[in-house]
């Protein structure tokens, strides 16, 4: 960056001014996952972005799943996956591994990375202070075990930590009515938390550029759509299967009062900052 | 319990009154471990005790290590332990397992058990908000890897949660100067946290009745000793080896301003309540 | 109590846990009177109960009348009672004695007893901060003098003291529109205060076991009834005359939003604790 | 007052401005007693003065004894006084009467009068929240019974009430180490409270113009003296006996940090206002 | 004033008691202008009145225009006034002078005078914190330049300063949508601020005794009228032209929820105090 | 700026991260003057910089003098300057003009420019809340009139406004002991305010690159010096005369506890941001 003159740099800062104003003191929920969780450089880029949001007076909340670490840990432990109706069953042993990886390894690893950026983070799972409550996911074709769906979010602990200057990092393990753990979709957790917090934005990091009207046609990227159209894309089957949980999270958030929900390309360094601090934004934005 | 008359019950409550007064609004740090973490009934008994402390206006903080779950998980993952100078080395892979078990499985399991008692708990490890900072344990005979010793405790997050009515549950994983994880002795963590919080009491649950002057002579149980004598017992080698970290934790706490530190028998149901709410107490008490 | 083992004691405490949870931070108004105000041992028992409620995080408010002390003081001063329509008239001189006994002797005596239990109490009458406002009780058959009925309760001073950790003790002297004193029924005062405070419970101590469906038949004790039935018992004359003001206080409280109102046997030591901390409770409970 | 023109009235208000500034938000302790407590017109005048102090942002605290009401009540109850070394003994029965009159009748009567002036007052005695603690007054010539001397003042309850806009009214009954009541000199109570509150002024209402250098010479009124000279007047016996407790109260206050202590003529209507709001003041002022 | 006895003075203070009670903690907006801004003695009298209001716990807000200082400054700068439809045009140069005189000279001069009375004042214009927003005054007969009419008041800064014990002094310069300055009528500013603050009173100082039903008949002074009649007097042209902006300010205030609006004679020393602290008041009062 | 890729922009933001951390919640006092107050583009650039500081959580305070506007206004008013010992005398008429221009025109103009950047600013002079107190500048060769030197700063009003999210803008008019106005050097005001506020930085905008060791040698720019050396440069006469007040302001600030004081080139757009958000900084920095 040494080629950039100081004048140039100051101009870039000044161009961020309207966005700084807009989001001052606001909550932004970021769903972190995919390649951005795997490649060291992308990881660091996201952590810098989150720390920067924090230090300019925005209140970020990070929600994450486990990505490939769960599968690799299960393999290491010689665990054989079973399926019901094409879906992987989370039996008790799998749930134990999921919880250890998500709430133990991944979650605390993110906390540590944020600390290295100078930010104080606190790692939580849905069981802490009963933050995310779930019930068993119903399935016509059999018992999916500890696969859960979110029923309630109690956001008090997030408000407390956020107001006191901590960055909450939330893993996608939920608690059931009898204290049992559930493996819930991290996109869905992010969507529900964004709604419960009355967030200004939900930003879902993906491994694609955004949502395509036709997934096979890279020129069909949707820049902006309303929530009704998003619901229709799910209903009529035109949405890419892999994007459906992310799309659902955005819908949950916007239907719950969040002003804008975004699916952006987590493979691009600092895509979070680009989305928040530029005029055009990137990826796909869903609004009411 | 149906044989107890209501009159009898009320008398028992009234007898607790002086202790309720004494500890109202005070912090009590409990080191949880040993058999009390293994047997279902004892587990439940400790959780009830902690919840009761919370609901009578005392502020409990629970610190735990991992017990036998770490070894069993390592075995499941085919990990071979290595030793330096008779001490087990915590290599990177071991540290990963330790962290997953402690901060993921054990910690969140305790949080869930407390929730079932109606208390809101939040599970932390030493990396959250840089609560417990450690450095590598020096060892003349080789590199112990990620075995750490506590250097600093930043108790702000504990104060915040405790004041707002949450019970903090802390696992013995610490953070190093570069964000790396350290496996630290849970007794030591409890001792340092008690000192940093200015706790009224540290209570260490053990699998023995308390400290014996002569471990082979069960009649030599020490009921009360001062911190100087405790230090001498370590210095002159008369303390039972297995009790040394617990004794050190008590010394750290009392030297740090904690009024009384206790080693009590965690195998006895509700030994916490007996210690706090009766005149004689149980186990061994160390004071300044 | 030395025959009770520590294990037994801790079990009793644990059995109180659900009730500790239920009433944590809640207000409980206790109407104190009858034998419990006369016999030294019962007195002490009630004071211990109130102090215990305070130290486990409940907010008790004590309301009392004067009991036999007023009559005895009047006799000592050679005062001859007069009657109108069978009711004792409170002339100016009587009112002066009532006020001295209630607000001076009885009230401050209770404050002192609570202080001996380690609790900070503040004694008030209805004139302090205009806490209880009354007007003259209408009577077709003549002027009852300074017998009053409660018209308004201004509970701000109770909230202030209670929130700051003081136990308010209120005597049944009220203030009229011109600053004059009124002798009001202490049960009624307790009922109105419970309603104005949005208390969780009103507990009226009596000298009987509770309310009987048929007073002459001791087997007809009512354990639970709804407020409508309570009103009917007054309307149809089936309630024992002596219990009517207590019944009215319970009705006022429940109609004013209090969850449960109780008439319990004040002759039984620690009946307050038994009512609050056991499953079955004692005496008669009235709910909406 | 109709002869006073509005212009004249506004000038009087304006002349009060420097004093309004000086005492804004400050605490002034007033010892109320003597004729000002007996004659209806003087009573009303003091109550108006106190209410005015309150409404211009000053924080008054009123301390009172019982005056002639105690003797008259004792006579009504046929009580015979006994003496030890020339001092009246306060036996248990006398103490009961003193407490009833002071804390019941007089105290609540003042509260009511202040309420009629639109101010919210709360009546306390030294037993409430252990405000005034005393021990038995030593006497070489015998046991004085429940005559006490002040040992400690716990002013928290006064601060709380005063900050929340209530006027505390305190009667001179103190509490002993075992909860027993003591009859203490009201001047002394006022002096100790003024010191404990860090009051800006103590004003003692008397039935004389102030302190005379020679009591028999009305021209020898002292307008201002320092605390050392005041102590000397007691030591050398030159102070009028009747003024000694008042002088002691002023000394206690000034030695305890109160800026100025005054003995003024309570027989003069609105002497409080004249003292506080005029340049010359009235009576005798004692300063460090 | 030395002829006034202390007794007399205290009686005057006591007569102010009901008004002290009534306005304790309330906001009173004073429109300052006319002769009271020109003659040194009247100036001082108003400043004393405002300081007194402040020190007895009332919250005064002072609003002022510029009076003759603007014209004199324009003359000194050789500026020639222009007119449109009989109204003076505020061109850019005039506006610059208006702003300098109002926000620079007059405003800070008042702040300084209040400081000399011991009160902490802060001088603001409508541009500070966007307190008073205006738009160009429409005029059929041409462009009036920077003559504005109030569109919005953002009173947060006034609340902040007032609550913290500062007296806000506001000059009648407003800010337009593009940051430009507008010369607005100070009476109107006072009326809008009184409404936005929910003031208890608006008091407009004038150079006449009040509002006359017939301006030529000095015996026709209106002492009290309702807002509907005030509106009619403007509509039917019976109000004196010079009083119309003041009348409009009163109407704005009362229609906006202010309890009473007054036009009083600023030529009379301490007319503010006379209005507020006497039974009859002076001048003309408009209420809903 | 359209040629800058989003990636580039985000990198620039990320590079600001360490500085955002460092100054989060800190106070930075900016002395605004010179060319930056004259040229429209530079003006706008400074306002954007100040607004940006505000929106990233820094607390800027702007201090300004009058620049060329005062001279031009004096000329317009036909005022002839007089001199004493080579120094311009501020007679009463001049002071009036200075105050009008500084506190009326310049100050409120800056407030308006900041408002257009979305920030809420409040314009003050040293008379408001007695913020800056001065006395007459002593001069051996005659009376300089209302030329003052700062004696005390009362920063409470700045703390209040700053904590509540307002940007204080302070003009260099001070108040004397009798309420009179003084014309004080704006650099000095900034230095005293920085010290009184415990600011993290004082930044003085100048019309040169910084301080030169030898003013005629542009290659002798001092990048960093300690306060002792700065004092020596004044004492030995080696400092450029025009820079002396700025140097003195920096010395006052650093001696008063400010961490770093800077003289930077106000002619360079966004020099404030460059100083604060880059590694090298610009201009001359003085530290302890």
Image (spheres, coloured by chain):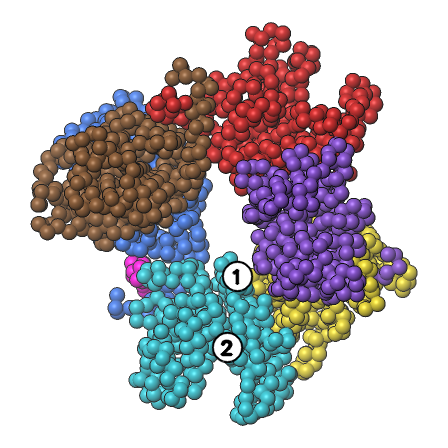
Chain colours: A cyan, B yellow, C purple, D red, E brown, F blue
Picture layout, residue E232 above or below residue A60: above
- Tag on residue E265? none
Please state the chain letter of the residue tagged with numbered disc 1 in the rendered image: A
Q: Residues within 10 Å of mark 2 (few under 14, many from 20)?
A: many
Magenta span main SS:
helix
- The residue at 9%/38% (across/down) is E80
- Rendered position, A204 above or below D123: below
Please state which of residues C77 and A277 is positioned toward the viewer in this rendering. C77
Q: Quadrant of the N terminus of chain C?
A: bottom right
Magenta residues (range): A1-15
The answer to which image quadrant residue D183 occupies is top right
Q: Chain of mark 2?
A: A
Q: Are marks 1 and 2 on the same chain?
A: yes
Residue at left offset 44%, top offset 34%:
E18
Q: Nearer the viewer, residue F60 or C122?
A: C122
Nearer-the-camera pick, F258 or D30: D30
Q: How far, Cα to Cα, is label 1 from label 2? A: 20 Å
Whichever of labels 1 and 2 marks the residue nearer the N terminus, that label is 1
Judged left or right of residue C191, residue C242 is right
The image quarter containing residue B120 is bottom right
Residue A10: x %, y % from top left = 31, 59
Residue at the location (89% across, 59% down)?
Answer: C3
- Residue A161 is labelled as 1
Count of numbered labels shown in the rendering: 2
Q: Position of residue C188 (x, y in %)?
A: 64, 50
Residue B6 visible: yes
Question: Mark number for residue A186?
Answer: 2
Helix, strand or loop at mark 2 = helix
């Amino acid at each position: 960056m040494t080629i950039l003159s100081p004048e140039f740099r100051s101009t870039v800062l000044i161009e961020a001014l309207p966005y700084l104003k807009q989001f001052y003191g606001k909550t932004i929920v970021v769903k972190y996952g995919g390649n951005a969780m795997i490649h060291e450089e992308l990881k660091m880029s996201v952590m810098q972005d989150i720390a920067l949001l924090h230090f300019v007076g925005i209140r970020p909340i990070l929600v994450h799943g486990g990505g490939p670490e769960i599968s690799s840990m299960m393999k290491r432990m010689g665990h054989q996956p079973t399926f019901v109706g094409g879906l992987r069953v989370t039996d008790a042993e799998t749930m134990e591994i999921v919880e250890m990886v998500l709430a133990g390894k991944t979650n605390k690893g993110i906390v540590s990375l944020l600390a290295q950026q100078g930010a104080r983070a606190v790692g939580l799972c849905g069981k802490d202070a009963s933050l995310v409550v779930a019930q068993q996911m119903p399935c016509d074709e059999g018992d999916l075990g500890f696969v859960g769906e979110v029923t309630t979010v109690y956001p008090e602990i997030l408000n407390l930590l956020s107001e006191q200057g901590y960055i909450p990092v939330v893993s996608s393990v939920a608690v059931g009515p009898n204290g049992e753990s559930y493996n819930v979709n991290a996109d869905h957790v992010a969507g529900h938390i964004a709604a419960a917090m009355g967030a200004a934005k939900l930003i879902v990091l993906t491994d694609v550029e955004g949502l395509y009207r036709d997934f096979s046609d890279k020129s069909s990227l949707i820049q902006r759509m309303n929530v009704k159209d998003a619901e229709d894309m799910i209903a009529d089957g035109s949405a890419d299967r892999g994007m459906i949980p992310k799309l659902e999270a955005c819908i949950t958030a916007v239907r719950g009062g969040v002003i804008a929900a975004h699916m952006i390309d987590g493979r691009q360094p600092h895509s979070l900052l680009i989305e928040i601090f530029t005029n055009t934004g990137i990826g796909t934005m869903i609004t009411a």
